[in-house]
Amino acid sequence: MTAAESLLFFERHAAAHYSARVDRESFKEALLEIMERKVHWAWPAFAKGRVPKELFHIHLEQEYATYVRDFPVLLGWAYVSCPIAKVRQELAENLYEEETGGISAGRPHPELFLEYPRGLGMDLARFSCVELLPKAAAFRAVLDDATRNRGWQAATAVTTIFLEGTSFERGEIDESAPKRPVPPLSEHPLVKYYGLPIEALALTKAHRSVEGSHRAAAWRVIMNHIEEPARRGVVAAMHDALEAWQAYRDDVAHACGVTRV
């Protein structure tokens, strides 16, 4: 079964409880292909400074309120619902870093995120009362459902693979695959196009210092501890997250004045 075929298999049959067993390799390929689709048509506009500065706050506010602020809580749901001690230990290290920054930066990651708008001179009061765009609220509902109602396996995959991961996940587990780009901090879009001081990239620096171990831990948990009966549900939850994320990013792009050519 090719990677494309494995993804199609899961999308068509996960909800129908298909009777065939799901082998480990097909499971991995399905997850990787979902992550390789975690790209959005509007991202070049954000990465190349084409979003008007007076509208950029919308993007940061929606990211913060949709999942950044509460990521430790979402991850916590995976932790408390998991019966496997080795998995909880991996999740606990991630949760400790997200909630306290104790491994890297000494501050919670949601607080570090706010250094972006602070450094750009935005009104931080906006971030305490964000009204989610309709598709942002729908995406958050999908995240809440995945982490609270669909088992520790789906909760772990959606938080540590989907939310924390990128379209370069294959490079995290395959030495021959393309790696996630790590450009100099001076080339960060917020620095290069919007005038953010490099010292305000505290979250970017924290992610770079711990993300390698977090990616390895995430895939170690997924591949070593999610058994065959739960695999279809995990892929279904990941697929739901992808679709909701794409729609959410559509909403943000339109609110920021970005149109699809």
Image (cartoon, helix red, strand yellow):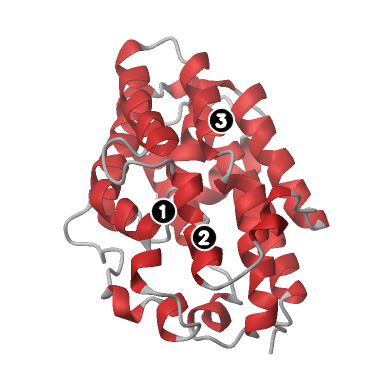
Query: Is residue 65 something that shows in the picture?
Result: yes
Q: CA distance from mark 1 to mark 2?
A: 16 Å
Q: Residues within 10 Å of mark 1 (few under 14, many from 20)?
A: some
Question: Which is closer to the viewer, label 3 or label 2?
Answer: 3
At 51% from the left and 22% from the top, the residue drawn is 152
Where residue 195 sits: x, y (%)? 46, 82
Quarter of the image for residue 56 reads bottom right
Whichever of labels 1 and 2 marks the residue nearer the N terminus, that label is: 1
Q: Nearer the viewer, mark 1 or mark 2?
A: 2
Q: Which SS class for mark 3?
A: helix
Question: Above or below — where is 110 with respect to 90?
Answer: below
**At which x and y percent is residue 108?**
43, 40
For residue 85, side relative to residue 126 (left or right):
left
Which circle marks residue 38 in the picture? 2
Residue 224 in the image: x percent, y percent? 30, 26
Q: Residues within 10 Å of mark 3 (few under 14, many from 20)?
A: some
User: Mark 1 belongs to which amino acid?
Assistant: Ala
In the rendered image, which residue does mark 3 sit on?
73
Secondary structure of residue under mark 1:
helix
Q: Which residue is mark 1?
A: 3
Mark nearer the N terminus (3 vs 1) = 1
Give the mark nearer the N terminus: 3 vs 2. 2
**What quarter of the picture does the C terminus occupy?**
bottom right
